[in-house]
Amino acid sequence: MAADDILTGSAFEALMTPLGPFEKSPHLAVGVSGGADSVALAVLAQDWVRARRGRVTALTVDHGLRPESAGEAAAVGRQMASFGIEHRVLTWRGAKPLSRVQDHARRARYALLCDWCRETGVLHLLLAHQRGDQAETVLMRLASGSGPDGLAAMAAVVETPAVRLLRPLLANAPEQLRATLRERGVSWIEDPSNLDPAYQRNRVRAALPGLAETGVTECGLAEFADRMGRAREALEESAAVLIGRAVHLHPAGFARVDRHALASAPAEVSLRALGRVLAAVGGRGYGPASAKLERLHARLAKDCADVRNTLAGCRVICDSRSILVCREQRGLPEPTAVTAGERLLWDGRFRIDLGSGSGRAMLAALGDARGGVGTLGSAVPAPALPALPALSDDDGVFAVPNLGYRRPGTVPLELAAIAFQPRTAVSGARYFLASQRSRIIS
């Protein structure tokens, strides 16, 4: 297929089919900025879903970074309405960062999109990343020294606790999407910030034509990402086997890792398993930087007995047989007032459902000043105790759910449920290659 060929409905259906399964009469959300890629995706998704008696909701995030952004979001809504597509504007509120603006904006955008899908019950969020975006991501990851995970770039399917992220256009050239819109007589918005050389992605995009003259092409970079994706798949499978054999994850949010099993595994597999444990126990959405992880791994391999380290929000402590990984106290959430019926993810690790009650309480880390509460936690090692969530009132701590502690007498709130549900699973969903659904389109 040539780059300037239009993307037909049947071709788009072939791209969507391997990304399923989809429910009967599916409700799809599509992230739509108003640019050519996202508008093309929304139009194609609308055709696809109509044939299945479903519906599409277009979601536009107004970052509030430019004075025109609100008007542009409204214009996207009018355009979507002309296609019969429902539209919602999600606004990034609060103070805006002064540095790493694009990175913060991206994180805020994903959070807003995923939160909307979770609250609305939408299972599939379509994103319009295409082959050019993939090539740019590979170059940016090369520049930052990424390993196989980073160089595999973006996955066609990402399973999250809130929604499935789907990228059906990942192997399609941007020119093909613009040609598809021209064929239909559909316009789009060009975001001026996409030309601002202050942003790394824009500089990389501007450099691609020159690189193509040396043989480093957009298509070649996408194919390279695909090969790295195959390597990532193999490593993930091996790491999952190692994790199942060597890691015991406790409901109180700490892990014990078998020293011998970790040391005897191939280094790249062992590194990956260790990084996943740190990401889960630390409550972050990502693992530690490769260089820092490798330094810790090297220390563990040499003489584990004297290792006392912190990394990625975790304490790492060794004894003769195992490695204890628990949440460190630094960076824990500030005390938060909570009321009956609330549901929240605390510290990126614990899903807490508050039950009945007539008063307010404070939710905070148990900390070091825990009186006699800690004596009940014999199954929880002492280093893991301070980072456990605890509920308190004016009389002190009245509940530490992970220790089974509840102060006798009347308390302001009852706990409905608590579960260790970290943002990053120790053994996550399988990486999904673009090549598993279609070939790289040249």
Image: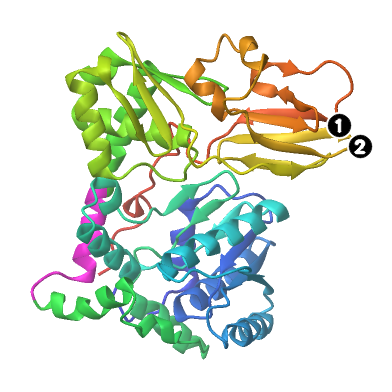
Left or right: residue 388 versus residue 258 is right
Neighbor class of circle 2 (other Cα within 10 Å; few <14, some 14-19, many 20+) is few
- x and y percent of residue 268 in the render? 22, 33
Q: Secondary structure at mark 2?
A: loop
Q: In the depicted view, which residue is nearer to us: 288 or 150?
A: 288
Asked whether residue 164 is in view, the answer is yes
Q: In the depicted view, which residue is nearer to us: 287 or 165?
A: 287
Query: At label 1, which amino acid type do we have?
Result: Pro
Q: In the depicted view, which residue is nearer to us: 256 or 23?
A: 256
Residue hosting label 2: 358
Q: Residue furthest right?
A: 358
Question: Magenta stretch: dominant SS?
Answer: helix
Image quarter of residue 142: bottom left
Sequence order check, earlier mark of 1 and 2: 2
- x and y percent of residue 199 in the render? 34, 75
Range of magenta residues: 214-228
Residue 412: mark in rendering: 1
Q: Do the residues bearing badges 1 and 2 touch, measured as CB atoms within 8 Å?
A: yes
Q: Does the stretch in magenta take in 219?
A: yes
Q: CA distance from mark 1 to mark 2?
A: 6 Å
Query: At label 2, which amino acid type do we have?
Result: Ser
Q: Secondary structure at mark 1?
A: loop
Q: Residue at coordinates 25% horizontally, 55% vertically from top-left?
A: 225
Left or right: residue 419 versus residue 392 is left
Q: Residue at coordinates 30% horizontally, 34% vertically from top-left?
A: 272
Give the vertical position of 29 relative to 245 (above or below). below
Name the quarter where the N terminus is drawn: bottom left
Q: Does the stretch in magenta take in 106?
A: no
Q: In the depicted view, which residue is nearer to us: 340 or 308?
A: 308
